[in-house]
Image: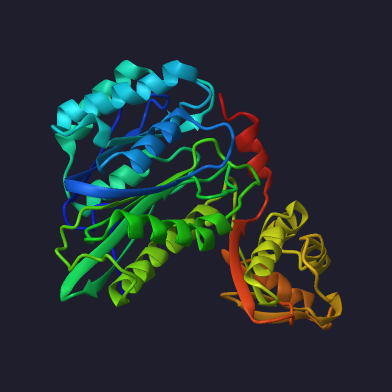
């Protein structure tokens, strides 16, 4: 596998565009399009929140019951959630407008929305925006970047990644973009993420690869413990790399999974590191757990601990909070066996050994915790399983952003 520059337009045959539709924001592009020159196999994972936004329901119908997909239309500013039959009808109107503008079937158009819950979309602006997107789409890296910018809400930077590998003598590419900064605590998938590939692969294996990979990538992210109504991950494969069809779990499938995992991991980490008000990416690695389920539960318990997140923000080596969060994760372990490490670009420091402080230097610990990417490693010494979760620190700015988000 080779890591390359780019996002949703990195794979052959995919185009993108961004447009300013004036949906909520008055000074920036707020609609994006991802379009494939050829029909795609489509896979998806969606929020498990009982309250599902209209676009989630629309996309589930297409992914689960239709032949495939050709395009995704995304808007930021308004989530089209809790909008009833009218909101679902706007999904259909958006798809119809895109179908007409792009010359593709209506049931091959996926839609996604992000922003304020409970507001109805200004559908005429959406329809006009679709026309602008269709006229402006290109396959350039810049177009992919502009699309990634257009789907941002409280995000502070666009998020995209790409990789490629060889399959049957052909170069196959996977690229993606996502958005997410707040209301991030996925279950089944997360936020909004759009991944494209020119791989020739069956719909069944495409869905299998995505469903399995979200468990170790997006599902291991938490910013604030809130699972969104709109969480969606879409994966489109158009086959334009002309590799031998991946229809069984052979070496080509494993190579595809590796590239997909890289893209999804990078996107997940970028979401965590750009949590609302965050000053650092907070990574928790659990090693030596008795089972994978235990490792996942332990790492996510620490990453979601408000007290721990606040300590990370204050560069305070308050390891008691971490050990406490491990203790209420619902996992049986011996606290007198646990080793704990802090690590960043400033170095690595063993904080506790066998559940007891090592007498570490507070000054050195503070220096390590003052970096933009901080890792806590907990060795449970209970087995061979491991897991990694990603989050961010909890800052004053998080409260400021969410206290007046609607205004």
Where does residue 83 sit, x and y in percent of width and height? Answer: 49, 20
Quarter of the image containing the C terminus? top right
Placement of 371 over or under 117, stated as above or below = below
Q: Is residue 368 left or right of residue 232?
A: right
- Tell me the residue at 17%/57% (across/down): 12
Image coordinates for residue 93, horizontal then vertical, percent: 30, 21
Where does residue 286 sit, x and y in percent of width and height? 66, 72
- Along the viewing direction, whichever of 314 and 380 lies nearer the viewer: 380
Residue 151's image quarter?
top left
- Is 145 or 42 nearer to us in this picture? 42
Decide if residue 307 is on the left or right side of residue 196. right
* Image location of residue 37, percent across then percent down: 14, 46
Residue 120 seen: no
Is residue 315 depicted above or below 341 in this figure? above
Please identify the quadrant where the N terminus is shown.
bottom left
Query: How is the structure coloured here?
Result: rainbow
Question: Residue at the location (21% across, 65% down)?
Answer: 245
């Amino acid at each position: 596998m080779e890591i390359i520059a780019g996002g949703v337009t990195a794979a052959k045959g995919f185009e993108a565009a961004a447009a300013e539709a004036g949906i909520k924001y008055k000074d920036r592009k707020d609609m994006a399009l991802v379009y494939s020159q050829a029909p795609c196999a489509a896979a998806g994972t969606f929020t498990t929140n009982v309250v599902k936004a209209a676009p989630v329901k629309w996309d589930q119908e297409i992914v689960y019951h239709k032949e495939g997909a050709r395009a995704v239309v995304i808007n930021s500013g308004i989530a089209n959630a809790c909008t009833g039959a009218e909101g679902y009808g706007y999904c259909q109107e958006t798809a119809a407008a895109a179908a007409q503008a792009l010359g593709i079937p209506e049931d091959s158009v996926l839609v996604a929305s992000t922003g304020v819950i409970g507001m109805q979309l200004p559908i005429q602006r959406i329809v006009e925006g679709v026309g602008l997107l269709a006229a402006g789409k290109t396959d350039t890296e810049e177009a992919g970047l502009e699309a990634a910018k257009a789907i941002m809400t409280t995000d502070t930077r666009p998020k995209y990644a790409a990789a490629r590998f060889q399959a049957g003598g052909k170069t196959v590419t996977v690229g993606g973009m996502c958005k997410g900064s707040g209301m991030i605590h996925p279950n089944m998938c997360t936020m909004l993420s759009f991944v494209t590939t020119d791989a020739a692969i069956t719909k069944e294996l495409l869905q299998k690869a995505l469903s399995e990979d979200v468990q170790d990538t997006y599902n291991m992210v938490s910013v604030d413990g809130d699972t969104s109504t709109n969480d969606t991950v879409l994966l489109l494969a158009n086959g334009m790399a002309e590799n031998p069809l991946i229809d069984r779990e052979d070496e080509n499938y494993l190579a595809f999974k590796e590239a997909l995992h890289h893209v999804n991991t990078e996107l997940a980490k970028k979401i965590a590191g750009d949590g609302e008000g965050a000053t650092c990416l907070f990574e928790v690695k659990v090693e030596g757990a008795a089972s994978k389920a235990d490792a996942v539960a332990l790492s996510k318990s620490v990453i979601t601990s408000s007290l721990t997140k606040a300590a990370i923000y204050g560069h305070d080596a308050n390891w008691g909070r971490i050990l406490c969060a491990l203790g209420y994760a619902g996992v049986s372990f011996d606290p007198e066996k646990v080793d704990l490490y802090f690590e960043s670009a400033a170095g690595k420091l063993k904080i506790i050994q066998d559940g007891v402080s090592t007498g570490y230097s507070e000054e050195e610990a503070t220096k390590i915790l003052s970096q933009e990417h901080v890792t806590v490693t907990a060795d449970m010494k209970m087995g061979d399983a491991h897991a990694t979760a990603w989050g961010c620190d909890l800052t004053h700015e998080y409260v400021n952003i969410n206290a007046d988000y609607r205004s």
